[in-house]
Each structure stands twice: as structure tokens, then as C-alpha cells.
Image (cartoon, helix red, strand yellow):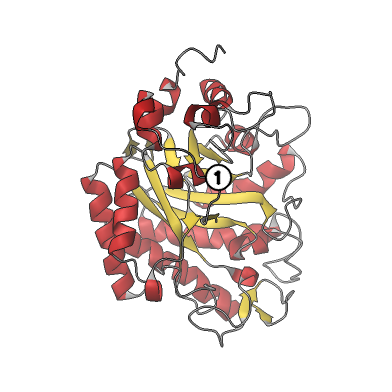
Amino acid sequence: MDQSLPLRTDVLFRPISLNGLELKNRVVMAPMTRKMSPGGIPNADVVEYYRRRAEGGVGLIITEGTTINRQAASNDSGIPNFYDPDSLAGWAKVVAAVHAAGGRIAPQLWHQGLARPAGTGPYPDAPSEGPSATVPGSKAMTDEDIADTINAFATSAASAKKIGFDAVELHGAHGYLIDEFLWSGTNNRTDAYGGDAIARTRFATEIVKAVRAALGPNFPLIFRFSQWKAQNYDARLAETPQELEGLLAPLVDAGVDVFHASTRRFWQPEFDGSDLNLAGWTRKVTGLPTISVGSVSLGGEDFFGQLRGDSTGAPIASLDELVQRMNDDEFDMIAVGRAMISNPDWANLVHNGDTDQLRPFEKTMLATLD
């Protein structure tokens, strides 16, 4: 593409419907941990943070990870929770502000599992918990723990619907609790929640079923998953498209509407013999809408240089390539993370090509991707 010509980004700004939820465009704000909710309660600064991104034109906001009602779910009291009445009241203010700015928003429901260091968070005396006790200071979850956790996810999802959120995302990625049950590296169980790759989906599918029952049939449910883990970037749940299909089919049957396939770089192929990324393969094997993500706008010296990618030809997160993949219907939406921290107007600026209002990209980020 001639880089002197305007970028043709119309494909990013087509409307889309997700189980009855109408979105004005295909740009999603990715969930990013902030640790800026004292006592786990979203305050006025959090309200303004999300309002500003909605005003900036994003089609759907997915909040930072917000924890369910399990003492071992969080490693920091500044991470918002999604069960305390004061926290829910704070989230209701976030929803009202986002809606007033013309946006749509989903909470990401989260349990950190074994990734939570022992002795941290609002309940430091609670042992960290996961499918197996594979790290110091942790315990393998009992059937009672599992049942209570499933109920906690469903209760938080019901609260999200009640206070006006537009969708719900379950965090099943990056080596946190749900992902730990899916991955053989952390799930050594020999009961009904362990075993082969399909058996290891039971915990996730039971959560999805409970959340679907709490939300009803006509409310979008997003499931975020990843191959990589925060503790192992080379980890994989599926080595082939066939294994991926086997992993995701039970989740589809349980009630997932949208898959958010988390990759570190959206342009990287997932399996040999195809250019499709993880979201592309997920769409192909499930037939469901997918969200892709991974280092959008993190190359180049100025804003449009970042979007286009490194001028040397290195595969930086080029908007040209993103547009091409979306024109090819590889995936349905694209999540933008760190770039939207720097530029809350990212969506509007890309849509309008308004270079006069662009601010330089901040290469050093304090926010971390969930």
C-alpha cells in the first residue's frame, strides 16, 4: 500500500451484532489491569477513565479484570472486585457514564488462581488455589471450593446484568484459574476435573453453563483464552486445529457467544501451513464471532507510523495488515490495549484520520495487559 495515501479503515467501523447487542464498530478496548480502585471499589477516577475511552469512539469496552467473591482471587487490594455492594455501586456509575458517552461495556470476571502469590491481596491469609497445588503456599481446590467458585462467577455475572452492563467476559487466559484447569502444566488432577484435554475443560464449561443460566439466553457472553501463559510464553493448549476444535467445542455447547483469542502479536500465524492467527482459527473451527488482539499500534515514530508498522518491513503491528485480515473476514473484532492508554481517542482518530489532534505514543507503559 502507498503510505502517502490515506489509510482505508472502513472495515474497522462496520456495525456488528453479538447475541442482540448492537455495536457501532469492531474496535474493542482490551482489558488492562490498573490497580487503581482503593479497597477494590471503583471510584470517580475509574468512572472518568472508562467514560473517556467511550467518548473516544471505541465500540466495546472490556474492563480491567475484576475479581469474583473468593478470598484467593486477587493479589492486590487496588484491583476492583465485582461482589462487594460498594464496588457494584461504583461499577454502576461506570456503566452510566459509558452509556451517556455512547459506549458499550462488559466486565471481565477474574480469579487469579495459582498466579496469585501467597500472602498477597485483600485476604493475605487465604492460601492461593488452583486445580493442583503446584506452587508454594497453594492448595488444590476441593469439590466444595470448585462449586463455590462456579457460583461466584455466576453471581457476579448476574450482578453485571442487573446494574446495566452490556455483556460479560470470563477471563480464561494467561495462566489464571480457569486457564490453569485447561492446561496440563498446572492441572494434575485425576478426578472429573482432570485428565485429557477434553476432560480438563469441565471446570470452564461448568462456569460457562452457570453464567449462561444467570444471564439468560439473550445476553452476550465472551470467553477469553490464550495459548501462552504469563509464566510460560511457549505454552500451548492445542498443537493443531483439530485439538483447538476439541478444546473449544464444549465451551460453545455450554453457551459462549464470542471468543476473545489472546495473542501477544495479532499478525503471527497460529499453526503451520496457514497464515490464520488464533482468532482466525477459532472463528473457523467454532463458527462464532472472535476478537483478536496483540500489539496493535506499537511500532513507528508517530501515530500513523505506529499504525502502519516499522518502515524497515519488520512485522510490527501494522494497521495495513490488520485491515487486510479483517477484509478477509479472518476475525470479527480487534482489541486495542496499550495504545488506547496513550490515546483515549484512538478509535476516532483512526476513523477520521485527524492527525492534528494526535498525541505522541508513550513507549513506556505502566499498565500491564491482563
Residue at the outermost bottom position: 125
The residue under label 1 is 363
Say whether residue 121 is left or right of residue 344: right
Q: Is residue 35 above or below residue 173?
A: below
Using the image as rendered, state which of residue 158 and residue 71 is in the foreground: 71
**Is 272 on the left or on the right of 341, as rendered?**
right
On the image, which quarter does residue 278 sit in?
Answer: top right
Residue drawn at (73%, 46%), measured in percent from left and top? 238
The residue lying at 75 percent from left, 53 percent from top is 235
* Residue 14 at least partly seen: no
For the image shown, how many numbered marks are present on the structure? 1
Question: In the figure, is residue 189 to the left or right of 208?
Answer: right
The N terminus: image quadrant = top right
Q: Residues within 10 Å of mark 1 (few under 14, many from 20)?
A: few
At horizontal 39% and vertical 26% (from top left) the residue drawn is 355
Residue 292: horizontal and vertical position, in percent? 55, 38
Image height of 328 relative to 18, above or below: above
